[in-house]
Image: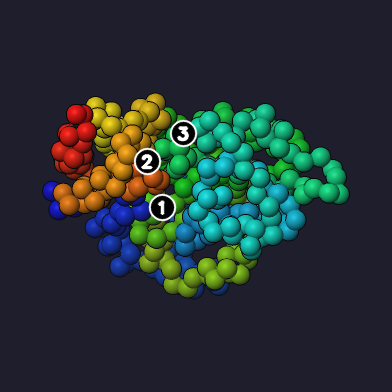
Amino acid sequence: MHDIVDLRSDTLTLPTPEMREAMARAEVGDDVWEEDPTVQRLEALAAERTEKEAGLFVPSGTMGNLVSVLSQTRPGQEIVLDQDSHIFNYEVASAAVIGGVQTRPMQTERGFLSPEQVRSAIRPPNIHIPPTGLVCLENTHNRHGGTVCTPEEIGAVAEVAHAAGIPVHLDGARIFNAAVAVRRPVAEFTRPVDSVTFCVSKGLAAPVGSLVCGSRELVARARRFRKMLGGGMRQVGVLAAAGIVALEKMVDRLAEDHANARRLAEGLASLPGIRIDLANVQTNIVIFFVERRGGVDELVPGCAARKVKIHAIGPTSIRCVTHKDVDREDIDRALDALREITRSWAA
């Protein structure tokens, strides 16, 4: 029984007792000197899961994406991505400010670039325009409601990019949610791309951290950029220990979060003034639209007063995210709160 039902994000998860114990007992060393054995175990485990040669522990997914971009581009190039992607919207223009690369956002239906879009976006040789340096994908897709891009779709995009000599980066912050949702090994999603970033601090419930995985050469470059950005950490095995537990113990239970998200979405679909596309609810993110004028301004504080926290992502849209600290009873409490507030909207 939770006093507060917090559906704002899966970044709000608290570490499990097993994680706390592992953190307290972790063997540590100086990771900048590459002497922290627990970090090395986590990086090796991440590389094994993604079928890449090496891994790198970074403080956040944002840093992971940035060092991946920096490691595969040079200033004056352009990266092709979806206009709703996290890299384009929520990473403080770091690719442009720090990397000197231009972003070329493309409009997509589900948040995923098609092979045809990538083919059309690749720049021809011309002294007036920036050469294409990188293609970026996101899976699952945050702003599109946790939708899943299949390994085959990723492979088709990578094939086009690689034929033109262009690498592909996968922002896989929630890639384990994608793998669990379609019951495919995570390596099938990551095998076609040159680099991948994934978070252990979201649904996997570790307190801090993400992993960058790729070739040994790419990870060596990424390690250098991590240091440049201030991400060189010392006895950080105390955090990596929680990441190891996350990968070994927390992946399969993501299916519970998906089931709770589906329960929430189906309940929302029956409420007046609420519009939701159930086909887009594939993992642990539920985005719904409020058709009543000023309805978002009623729902967010109204739910908070009933000890349910939800997050407005626009003037007419709300995002809810399920995670390990939200159970089936919490979902029902949230629906009761929403039902009570919207009851008068049917009139």
Residue drawn at x 54%, y 71% is 230
* For residue 290, side relative to residue 307 (left or right): right
Callout 3 secondary element = loop
Q: Position of residue 90 (x, y in %)?
A: 50, 53
Mark nearer the N terminus (3 vs 1):
3
Are dots 3 and 1 in contact, CB under 8 Å?
no
Mark nearer the N terminus (2 vs 1):
1
Quickly name the residue at label 2.
Answer: 316
Q: Real-space Cα distance between discs 3 and 2?
A: 24 Å
Callout 1 secondary element = loop
Q: Quadrant of residue 340?
A: top left
Q: Real-space Cα distance between discs 3 and 1?
A: 18 Å
Q: Looking at this view, is 149 or 48 the one in front?
A: 149
- Mark 3 is on which residue type? Val
Q: Quadrant of residue 20?
A: bottom left
Q: Which numbered mark, 3 or 2, is in the foreground of this view?
A: 2
Q: Position of residue 326 (x, y in %)?
A: 23, 45
Q: Which mark is residue 200?
A: 1
